[in-house]
Image (tube, rainbow, N blue to C red):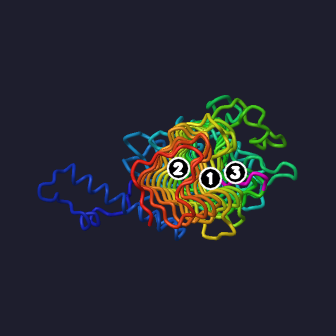
Amino acid sequence: MSRDRGISEDSHDRNIGEEARPGEDSSKLELRRRAFLTAVAGSSIALAGCMGSANDDVGIVHGPIAERPAKGEYDDMLFHAKDQGITWRWDASSEDWVYFSGRGSGDQPVPGTSHLEAARIRHARSKETPVWNVEAHGIKGDGTTEVGQAIHELLDSVDKTGGGIVYFPPGRYLLERTPLVGDNTIILGAGRSTVFEGPRPDGSEGRALLSNKGYDASEYNGASNWAVCNVRVDSPASNGILPAHAENVRLENIYGDAIYYHHIDIVSSKNVTVDGYWATRGGEGSSDAPMQFDNQNQGTAANGIQDGDEYRLTKDDDTPAKNCTLKNFEIDPENEPSHGVHIHRDGNESITIADGHITGCQNSAIRADTGGLVEDLTINRVSCIENARGISLGHIEEGRRELTISNVTIRTDDSKIAAGSGLYASGFAGAEISNVVVDGEFTNSIIFDDMVDLKMSTVTAKGARDQAFRFRENVDVTLTTARAENCGSAGIYSGPGSSVAYAGVIFDNSGSEIDVDGEIREWVTSESA
């Protein structure tokens, strides 16, 4: 085999010099020489790929993969397998050929399949993570071929070899069944140009577009350490991405268009982070929040996968959705769904909703089910603009714990849209509300029931048809540095069983400042504007 590196010694001398630079020893000179040669070879590969030329001048050995030698003659030697469309580099430190460039071909494997399987790469977190390109496995994103079963089988193969990255080039992939992701696997698309759609027969709408192995396991024993990144969900007949009984999941840069229920539905899973989510539509089915935190309580007949011709439910063992986060998101649906974010059923724990914008909801921007228990709910830096209501966490007397709402704006300028309360919560023991503005012709700006140890500071409530701050029943609250403005009835209402201590409250154009059926404890004289 020729050892020609595609550049003569004279040429080498002209470019980097045969002599060492002042103060440079021979080892540093050799490193500069290798770096230069590698750069030249890499540029030549790019040119060869664009021009379709063998370009033998650059010293890349060409031939079919079967003719690749068992080892290279020198470190950084390149071999271009013409039938693969892949260039391999000899790495003397590992004594193996490693992937250098190229996309592979439809009938030849890309790195992460046959070659790396033979090398027995067993874990997705290895130094050189395997990459599986679905095109190389005959999976077409042409918008007409159903590929759900083929993707499911490919994901199963990836799982059995220890995981890896499964890459979906731009295209529309029809998932007639629900592919199941295994441990240590990343599904990676090319952004909005990689589209997933789940065609479903009539009568089977709403079954998951994509889920994980162990969706029917107990507690958090489903697949763990997996992710879906940079894909668009445009699937009017299916539910969306469904982590179920899973652990340590990341959903990143998800674009949500048409959907039947929810683009993302986190069911009885732990440590799930949604980072980067943009919804342009809500669901078309009976439950139509684009984003949902959910639990598979006993007897639940929803939340299942399409397994070939069968519908299979996730296990209903009351496992809570726990330690889950939605951040860096925008929900701006054109079809006016009921809610933007839905906290569904009983038993959600440690849910964080942060750094987002929600608009266009017919009911509430953020809603928890009536009677559903919630522990440790945090809503921070979220704007709820032009929704019928802002945040609705009501209708339960007790059993909820730890609520934090901070740096939130709830505003609906259109009086025809505004309805009910801007902010409503009940049943929490221990809640802190700070740096919050509620603005609009809601019936009441802010209303609370059955709240123990409620602390509110730097809160503005204005524009309500009735009351700015309504502590309706059994509320123990401290309200400081607040403003009640342009409300029709009263700035503060203290209802039966309530105890309201307030200080530094400004009343501006209120029907009356205080309406008392419970206890009012005024710390200092409040001023009227």
The verdict on residue 288 being magenta is: yes
* First of labels 3, 2 by sequence position: 3
Q: Is residue 332 left or right of 325 when viewed as pictured?
A: right
Which label is found at residue 280?
none
Query: Disc 3, disc 2: CB below 8 Å?
Result: no
Secondary structure of the residue carrying numbered label 2: strand
Placement of 71 over or under 289, stated as above or below: above
| Quarter of the view holding residue 181 | top right
Q: Between 7 and 434, which is closer to the camera in this rendering?
A: 434
Residue, disc 3: 240
Residue farthest toward the right in the current orientation of the protein: 202
Residue, disc 1: 366
Q: Disc 3 residue type? A: Gly
Q: Is residue 115 visible?
A: no
* First of labels 1, 3 by sequence position: 3
User: Which numbered mark, 1 or 3, is in the foreground of this view?
Assistant: 1
Residue name at image x 87 percent, y 53 percent: 202
Q: Residues within 10 Å of mark 3 (few under 14, many from 20)?
A: many
Placement of 223 over or under 253, stated as above or below: above
Residue 423 appears at what percent x and percent y? 59, 54
The verdict on residue 501 being magenta is: no
Query: Disc 1, disc 2: CB below 8 Å?
Result: yes
Residue 266 appears at what percent x and percent y? 64, 43
Q: Disc 1 residue type? A: Ile
Residue 339 appears at what percent x and percent y? 68, 55
Secondary structure of the residue carrying numbered label 1: strand
Residue name at image x 53 percent, y 55 percent: 514
Q: Residues within 10 Å of mark 1 (few under 14, many from 20)?
A: many
Q: Quick one: quadrant of the C terminus?
A: bottom left
Which label is found at residue 379?
2
